[in-house]
Amino acid sequence: MQFENHGLTIGVKRINSEVFLTLKVQGKLTHEDYLTISPMMEGALEQLKHPKISAYIDASELEGWELRAAWDDLKLGLKYGGEFEKIAIYGNKKWMDVAAKIGSWFTKGEVKHFYLQEDALKWLMDK
């Protein structure tokens, strides 16, 4: 039996006095994933009472999006883009550089892609 592993995990991480929204994405995201992601994202953002939020996205296991899921991702970015101060994307795929650049068009904060997890976290903590 073969399993198709895809989806998103949302959490909150605290390093020293800094608090980050964390997202771990896996596989190829679908429209059905976003039906689950959207309410989870709303709930996570409501719990963080900071004026501007920093986010750490572990995309090291992300394979991409189905077309409809890409549209869902765009809508989510437009809805919540103003909430973010910094978004660090960690992953080892070259196309993530382009994804970070496109993502920065839909948020008021900075979006950067990192090949090393430590570099992503250091950048988030640098105020």
Image (tube, rainbow, N blue to C red):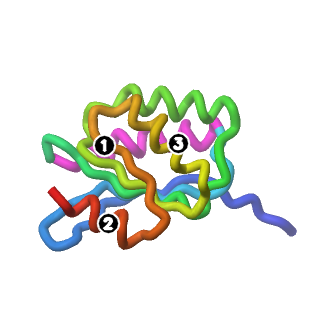
The answer to whether residue 123 is seen in the rendering is yes
Under circle 3, the secondary element is helix
Q: Residues within 10 Å of mark 1 (few under 14, many from 20)?
A: some
Which residue corresponds to mark 3?
99
Position of 52 with respect to 54 (left or right) is: left
Q: Residue at x 57, y 63 (%)?
A: 92
Disc 1 + disc 2, Cβ < 8 Å: no
Query: Horizontal and vertical percent for residue 70?
Result: 60, 34
Q: Residue 39 carries which label?
A: none
Q: Give the image location of residue 89, x and y in percent.
A: 44, 55
Mark 2: amino acid: Leu
Query: What is the distance, in whole Å, between disc 1 and disc 2 at their CAs?
Result: 14 Å
Q: Residue 121 carries which label?
A: 2
Q: How crowded is mark 3: few (under 14 residues within 10 Å), some or many (20 or more)?
A: some
Residue drawn at (36%, 68%) of the image: 119
Q: In this view, does 80 lie above or below 59?
A: above
Q: Does the magenta stretch include residue 40?
A: yes
Q: Give the range drawn in magenta.
A: 31-49
